[in-house]
Amino acid sequence: MARIAVIGAGMGAMAAAARLAVAGHQVAVYERSATYGGAVGRFERDGFAFDTGPGLLHLPAVHRDLFVKTGKEALEKCVELVQVDPSSRHVFADGTAVSLPNASRAGVVSALDAALGAGAGERWGDFMGRAREAWDRTRRPLLEEPLPADTSPLAREPYPGLKSGLLRRTPTTLAEVGRRELRDPRLAALLDGYALAYGLDPATAPASAAVLPYMEQTFGSWYVLGGIRALADALHERCLARKVEFVFGAEVARVLEKDGRAAGVELADGRQAEADHVVAAAPVPALYRDGVIGSVGQEPPSAVRTGRVTLCLALRGAREADAAHRTVVHSTDAADERAALAAGRTALRPTVVALRPDDERLRPDGAHEAVTVTATVPVAVEDGWEAFADRMTEAAERAVPGLRERLLWRHVRTPADTLRETGMAEVPAPALAGAAGRLLPSANVSPLPGLYFAGGWAHPGGGLAHSGMSGALVAGLIVEGADFRGSR
């Protein structure tokens, strides 16, 4: 039995801790804040409750595997999962709207043809076929296997592109895919929306980001009753059941080293805890920035420069029975939105995502509604957030009729809140191939023996599913050692 110290109590950290505890190890988690969950937070006021991080679950198989492997109770015994249908409603700049069914490629094609005109669905369906090729080429190395020492094959673009006529050159960015292959500004906006939802600028995101809509439309979108925070609660309970120790209010100042390997952690108050392995599940750039692992080499600058603004909106009046759970209101000025992301300013007319869960646990009663609205922004912006929140609220009214008249109050969360709670203002993106490797996160194995990286800033990157996979990979590396070849 080895002693293992885990830095941070986010979702990736708890996923690793639960798996390692089941393997017979003694696991202690050190979290600088007063609670667990990391970016999966909760804001509550006046009987309203809001997720402040992810609002939907994709690739639920990752968490089903986690709960099966760490105890007798399956995921669905611990939380109630609801498949969201339609998966999303989209409102485009010209006022056209379309609702896309959940996990139905044929249904999506039909819906796009009906809303955008004959041929639109076919073009999107053909694009999804090419996205599947990119997914098949990168799924195992980017989700299920440790990052290889030689990442040069993953630096090459896996998306095949449309090989016909003048379009034989493989596109290099997602925006180029939309412009050249989808040939409809609304379809291009649909594609851009998936990138923005993951904190990526479509103008710079590699074409391989096509796997993001493929993943959602193939495996579906799910909601956890009580909010995604309920998933964090269930994972924390699973860790406690497996005898994982949590120490809150415990900021780790540095990783201890002995004989050339990690040997434990030292807390900010001077206390030390010896360990045979250390799992650093706090944001890797922050660990380098703050000197926690300063002797472990040089972390390359993060390619991510975007964060999120989140509005928690308390509304009077009941939610309409036919309201979509998720509505994406696309920018009415896509050119300005792209220019704003490039220039480090907020967009005049941002793309926003409105989440309207039909969940009685999030509202005081049936005569009220809790709505969350998010937008992707550059983290370089320092002020003007209230004015930007006004613009977000105006855009969200296209998803929530009469929103401003129904508004009781709003709570605005900015990248500064993300920085305070997680140590980084940015939101980590999923690992993506192509782009010369700049969207490949830190490997799970650090340069210092005995020190491992987990969580959204480590392989395979950001997102609930990806951080869960990071925990599985780290646990496998510690338990099986150098022979570990990935999850099965």
Image (tube, rainbow, N blue to C red):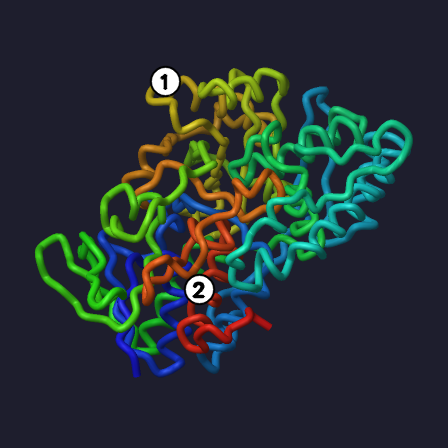
Dot 1, how many residues are within 10 Å of its Cα: few (below 14), some (14-19), or many (20+)? Answer: few
Residue 22, percent from left and from top: 39, 80
Q: Is residue 140 above or below residue 197?
A: below
Residue at the image point whose x is 27% and y is 40% from the top = 420
- Front residue of 113/13: it is 13
Tag 1: residue type?
Answer: Gly
Write down the residue under mark 2: 471
- Front residue of 335/274: it is 274
Write down the residue under mark 1: 384
Residue 167, percent from left and from top: 84, 30
Label located before the other in sequence (1 or 2): 1
Residue 327 shows up from this direction: no
Residue 339, percent from left and from top: 55, 17
Quadrant where the C terminus lies?
Answer: bottom right
Residue at the image point whose x is 32% and y is 36% from the top = 417
> To which quarter of the image does residue 310 belong?
top left
